[in-house]
Image: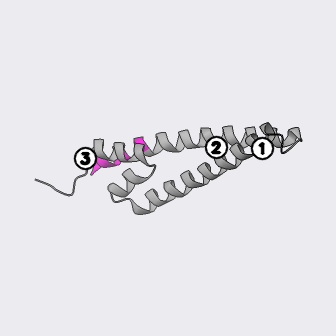
Amino acid sequence: MNTDKGHPGVAAVLSFVFNGLGQLYNGQILKGLTIIFFSAVSMTILIIGSVFIALWFLGKIIFNQVLILGLILFFLSLVSICIIGIYSIIDAYQAALKK
């Protein structure tokens, strides 16, 4: 029995739980760390956008441009997180199948 072969289901679930973890499980260290980095950047931008929106709703910032910037940052990062997550799951599954 070949113990070096990864299980595709495990790799996909790990990537679902945390983007890039499935790649690390498959031995693709650089790819996994790259996905983790871009996920962290996207999450940071999502938080910044959320803070801008919250400050506008609380009345701490009066300018509508801040609300627009917050909405743009929030939705772009949300789309980015979804794309990275889907890519991470599919890639981890396919890489484990090829091993």
- Extreme residue in the right direction: 63
- Magenta stretch: includes residue 5: no
Q: Specify the amino acid type for callout 1.
A: Leu
Circle 3: is it few (<14), some (14-19), or many (20+) Cα within 10 Å?
A: some
| Picture coordinates of residue 6, whole percent (x, y) | 25, 51
Q: Earlier in the sequence, mark 3 or mark 2?
A: 3
Q: Earlier in the sequence, mark 2 or mark 1?
A: 1
Residue located beneath label 2 in the image: 77
Identify the secondary structure beneath mark 3: loop
Disc marking residue 7: 3
Of badges 3 and 2, nearer the viewer stands: 2
Q: Find out whether the residues at labels 2 and 1 contact each other: C-beta distance under 8 Å.
A: no
Direction from residue 75 to residue 35 in the image, left or right:
left
Q: Magenta residues, as a range?
A: 89-99
Residue located beneath label 1 in the image: 55
**Residue at horizontal 44 percent and vertical 52 percent from the top:** 20
Q: Find out whether the residues at labels 3 and 2 contact each other: C-beta distance under 8 Å.
A: no
| Picture coordinates of residue 89, whole percent (x, y) | 41, 42
Q: Earlier in the sequence, mark 1 or mark 3?
A: 3
